[in-house]
């Protein structure tokens, strides 16, 4: 019997993160200070982020060494397996070979600890005792609470209100690891109070929660802010996923033709894709598909512009695909994908033609998740179901064209804390929602004029 899962030993775990900035054919546009429209001095970012993380954010080095303390922490669950989805292949009657990188094995159940642990570690080394952050569906909040407990740091989490109500068990996981969790928008910050004054029933968004977390971090000298996606150093840390997958494909004697991942801010997609993107830049023929929801179509219908990373304009301006910082997406159940912006690195990769985007409705994604669970066993997170939907569509296309392509997607996390969403799907209560163009246009009209 051929192996279904491809494993690596702890000794095979990457010893350095990969930085795509070193290989892109043109430089990443710098973040700008909104007061001057000039590049932000990296030293200014140190009031928000650990110095080591700021250095990684702007680094042009191709490889950045992973400290041994972080590798030891990673070893709790890494390396993660590469799995051949033979059951899914059979159900689809496709000649395609489908693989997935299974990131559901971490203690919080997603890929997010790949960056939560480095971020907590570097802050701990610099004597920071408190961290603030935002979370959408809760995977990032759980991951940071887990990492902060490991390094004895207090963790304050602003959780998007619609997910706070939809996903109580993720909230409980954060509490188990010592996290302090507040529904956002809240009355604890000026940003939250401002939003609630305009809309007392606001469901919240990642942009709003970021505003609250940044404001809370700036209110105390002993506190720093952390972000679970979007930024360059987050993409860097997540590269362990793709670097492991490269070694595993060598062992499997195969290589991907198509690489897919869901995108909200871009971290799990970049983590899997970027180590392979460098080979596309060097001439290898690989497609990269970023899978997003129709209800928050940042890459499909947004613009590549400078915009704020948060709703109340506390962050620097970043060149990225955006729907506008005032955009508040509907309360879909893939809460981790409800973000107005996109990683600047993923955005530039798309502008350069290295990455393409595909948008899906939530019901077709839940249908894909159900088929995946029935054939492969794991119940995927609603976010991951977008990548599964994309992979299934590619496999069906291979069936129709009789092409035996190799498809790789990232299973970014399990859905064991998302069963209420699945119950609504089975009850027929989930609705598909394509955001009206006029609403997108309203938000885009508020973008800064450069």
Image: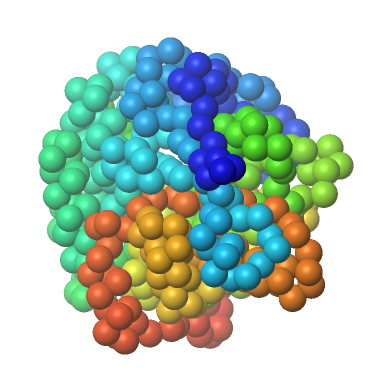
Question: In this view, which residue lies farthest toward the right?
Answer: 283
Instruction: Using the image as rendered, state which of residue 266 and residue 6 is in the foreground.
Output: 6
Q: Is residue 129 above or below residue 313?
A: above
Is residue 359 in view? yes
Q: Residue sitting at 59 percent across and 62 percent down? A: 89
- Report x, y in % for residue 19: 63, 31
- Report x, y in % for residue 148: 25, 30
299 left or right of 311? right
Q: Residue sitting at 54 percent across and 69 percent down? A: 91
Question: In this view, which residue lies farthest toward the front?
Answer: 1
Looking at the rendered image, the quarter that the C terminus falls into is: bottom right
Instruction: Using the image as rendered, state which of residue 333 and residue 418 is in the foreground.
Output: 418
Q: How many marks?
A: 0
Instruction: Using the image as rendered, state which of residue 173 and residue 439 is in the foreground.
Output: 173
Is residue 341 in view? no
372 left or right of 242? left
Q: Is residue 445 above or below residue 265?
A: below
Colour scheme in use = rainbow
Q: Is residue 9 above or below residue 345?
A: above
Q: Residue sitting at 40 percent across and 66 percent down? A: 374
Q: Quadrant of residue 355?
A: bottom right
- Report x, y in % for residue 376: 44, 58
Looking at the rendered image, the quarter that the N terminus falls into is: top right
Instruction: Using the image as rendered, state which of residue 336 and residue 420 is in the foreground.
Output: 420
- Report x, y in % for residue 134: 31, 49
Q: Residue sitting at 52 percent across and 27 percent down? A: 8
202 left or right of 393? left
């Amino acid at each position: 019997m051929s192996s279904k899962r491809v494993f690596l030993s702890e000794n095979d775990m990457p010893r350095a993160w990969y930085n795509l900035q070193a290989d892109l054919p043109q430089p990443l546009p710098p973040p700008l200070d909104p007061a001057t429209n000039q590049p932000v001095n990296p030293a200014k970012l140190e009031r928000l982020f650990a110095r080591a993380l700021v250095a990684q954010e702007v680094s042009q080095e191709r490889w950045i060494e992973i400290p041994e303390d972080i590798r030891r922490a990673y070893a709790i669950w890494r390396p993660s397996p590469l799995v051949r989805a033979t059951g899914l292949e059979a159900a689809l009657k496709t000649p395609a070979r489908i693989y997935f990188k299974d990131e559901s094995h971490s203690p919080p159940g997603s890929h997010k600890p790949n960056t939560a642990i480095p971020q907590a570690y570097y802050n701990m080394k610099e004597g920071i005792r408190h961290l603030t952050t935002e979370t959408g569906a809760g995977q990032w909040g759980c991951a940071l609470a887990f990492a902060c407990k490991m390094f004895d740091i207090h963790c304050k989490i602003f959780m998007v209100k619609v997910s706070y109500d939809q996903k109580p068990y993720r909230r409980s996981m954060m509490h188990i690891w010592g996290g302090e969790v507040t529904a956002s928008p809240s009355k604890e910050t000026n940003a939250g109070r401002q939003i609630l004054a305009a809309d007392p029933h606001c469901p919240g968004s990642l942009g709003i929660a970021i505003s609250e977390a940044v404001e809370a971090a700036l209110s105390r000298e002993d506190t720093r802010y952390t972000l679970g996606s979007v930024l360059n150093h987050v993409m860097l840390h997540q590269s362990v996923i793709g670097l492991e997958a490269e070694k595993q494909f060598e062992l499997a004697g195969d290589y991907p033709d198509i690489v897919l991942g869901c995108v909200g801010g871009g971290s799990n997609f970049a983590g899997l894709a970027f180590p392979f993107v460098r080979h596309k830049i060097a001439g290898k023929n690989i497609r990269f598909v970023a899978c997003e929801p129709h209800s928050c179509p940042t890459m499909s219908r947004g613009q590549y512009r400078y915009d704020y990373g948060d709703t109340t304009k506390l962050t620097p301006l970043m060149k990225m695909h955006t729907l506008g910082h005032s955009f508040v997406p509907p309360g879909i159940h893939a809460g981790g994908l409800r973000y107005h912006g996109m990683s600047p690195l993923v955005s530039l990769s798309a502008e350069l033609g290295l990455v393409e985007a595909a948008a899906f409705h939530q019901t077709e994604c839940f249908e894909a998740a159900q088929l995946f669970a029935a054939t492969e066993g794991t119940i995927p997170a609603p976010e991951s179901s977008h990548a599964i939907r994309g992979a299934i569509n590619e496999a069906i296309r291979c069936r129709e064209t009789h092409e035996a392509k190799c498809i790789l997607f990232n299973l970014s996390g399990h859905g064991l804390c998302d069963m209420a969403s699945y119950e609504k799907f089975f009850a027929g209560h989930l609705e598909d929602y394509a955001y009206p163009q006029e609403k997108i246009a309203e938000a885009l009209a508020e973008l800064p004029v450069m």
